[in-house]
Image: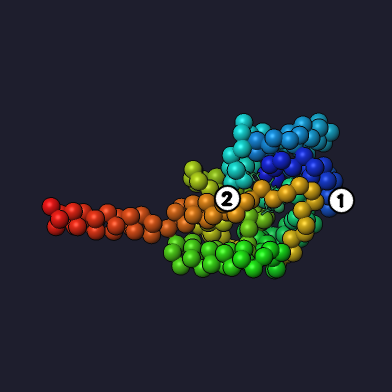
Amino acid sequence: LIVPCYNEAQNVDAFYDRCLQVFEPAEFEVIFVNDGSKDDTYKKLQHLHEEYSNVLVVNFSRNFGKEAAIYAGLHYATGTYLSIIDADLQQDPEIVKHMTEILEKKPDVDVVAAYQKQRHEGKFMAWCKDHFYRFINRLSEVDLRENASDFRTFRRNVQEALLDMPEYFRFSKGLFSWVGFETEYIPYVAAERFAGTTKWSFAKLIKYAMEGVISFSTMPLQLATFCGALVSVFAIVYG
Ligand code: UDP
Ligand code: MG
């Protein structure tokens, strides 16, 4: 399990305990990536690492964002199946178990991705997200499944493909779609956060959405070229 953590000191112990309830100790490994937390997350993770041999900790020098944390986790993960999951227990490790069972049963499926059946958010937010998916699916060659996040379990071939992409800005949803592979989608209901608050403000989400569009579509570039040409024509005529 690859677990990006930013200020999750109150959650990491509970997260690991939940894993112990779901998996046998020899069956899993957790790679916590401390993404420059300002609270005691790193200290808590060090304790977990000292106590349990299947806990690995990657520590960032500052906050680089969830996407960078996922990338670092992918570098260190050695499991047969890899899973990306949040530290706040909104996504139950039990679902990961179910995902691995699907991979075990179906050799032709390489990725099992979970999507949220219903979202616990306001109408405005739901509207924004809905339109973001429509917009990016129309503009870019990647096809994003609505409400599917990076909560997924996949095989090593997918890990290798993701690591092969040295993107500076990593828009996971897009990267997963870009590398392809047979993907099965399963619905899940996100639980309430165990402790703490979300790290995504509306402004951060807008920035993220814009970077996603720029990374996976040349439309903004074409628009800039077109506007530049138009201004040049006007300037020549005026001159
Ligand atoms: N996260 C991170 N770096 C960041 C922001 C978030 O590693 O800069 C982690 C966070 O600790 C959590 C996961 O990404 O494990 C999802 O974040 P959050 O729960 O705040 O997002 P939400 O569930 O509200 O979409
Ligand atoms: Mg969360």
Instruction: Name the residue nearer the viewer: 25 or 201.
Output: 201
The kind of residue tagged 1 is Gln
The residue positioned 53% from the left and 48% from the top of the image is 170
The residue positioned 14% from the left and 57% from the top of the image is 237
Give the residue at mark 1.
21
Neighbour class for label 1 at 10 Å: few (<14), some, many (≥20)? Answer: few
Q: Left or right: 223 with respect to 174?
A: left
Residue 204 badge: 2
Q: Residue furthest right?
A: 21
Instruction: Name the residue nearer the viewer: 221 or 140.
Output: 221
Secondary structure of the residue carrying numbered label 1: helix
Image quadrant where residue 234 sits = bottom left
Instruction: Name the residue nearer the viewer: 182 or 38.
Output: 38
Image quadrant where residue 12 sits = top right
The residue positioned 74% from the left and 42% from the top of the image is 8
Determine if the C-beta at disc 1 is less than 8 A from ligand 1: no
Q: Left or right: 119 with respect to 10?
A: left
Secondary structure of the residue carrying numbered label 2: helix
Q: Earlier in the sequence, mark 1 or mark 2?
A: 1
